[in-house]
Amino acid sequence: MPLLAPAAEVLEIRRVVQAADRLEVGSAWQDTGLIFSTKTGRPIEPRNLARSFRRICDSHSLRVITVHHLRHTTATLLKNLKVPARDAQLILGHSRMAVTLEIYTHEDREAQREALGRIGDVLRSNEVPETP
């Protein structure tokens, strides 16, 4: 069984949960169009989100990080998945690509080893790649 559900499944679960919440609270429902909201459809308060995230980490014996660190993790995962920097910038909502690349995207030792290994392969083969 996969560790994470596909995004489409997560979105469908949220749609079903929100429909149930909407029925339960009736006229108190605020249709904000948000995917992740309170039981009444309103935006989730940042402190409540941080508390819930901490509780999830604790209950699953996960190392506690701040919710903001998830943005850094997402940026690095997008880079490792070879998502173009411009797309990562848009996904993360940064106004400039430099913010995404210089602040949020972190080093990847494995990618560095791989790149150095490729240089070693070229040097051992005595073939110099053409330069543009």
Image (tube, rainbow, N blue to C red):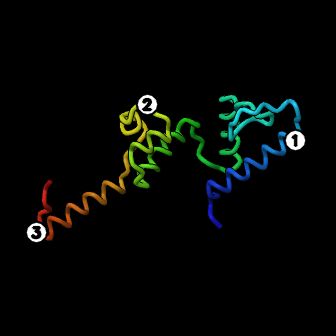
Q: Is residue 83 above or below residue 120?
A: above
SS for dot 2: loop
Q: Residue at x 80, y 33 (%)?
A: 40
Residue 5 horizontal side relative to residue 123, left or right: right
Residue type, mark 2 in image: Ser
Quarter of the image containing the C terminus? bottom left
Q: Earlier in the sequence, mark 3 or mark 2?
A: 2
For label 2, count other residues whose C-alpha is less than 10 Å away and answer few (under 14), some (14-19) or many (20+). Answer: few
SS for dot 1: helix
Tag in front: 1 or 3: 1
Quarter of the image containing the N terminus? bottom right
Q: Residue at x 81, y 45 (%)?
A: 19
Coordinates of residue 122 in the picture (x, y in percent): 17, 65
Q: Residue at x 78, y 50 (%)?
A: 16
Residue 118 horizontal side relative to residue 21, left or right: left
Q: Earlier in the sequence, mark 1 or mark 2?
A: 1
The residue indicated by pointer 3 is: 126
**Marks 1/2: CA distance?**
38 Å
Coordinates of residue 30 in the picture (x, y in percent): 78, 31
**Marks 1/3: CA distance?**
71 Å
The residue indicated by pointer 1 is: 23
Numbered circle sitting on residue 93? none
Coordinates of residue 14 in the picture (x, y in percent): 73, 47
The residue indicated by pointer 2 is: 95
Residue 56 is drawn in which quadrant? top right
For label 3, count other residues whose C-alpha is less than 10 Å away and answer few (under 14), some (14-19) or many (20+). Answer: few
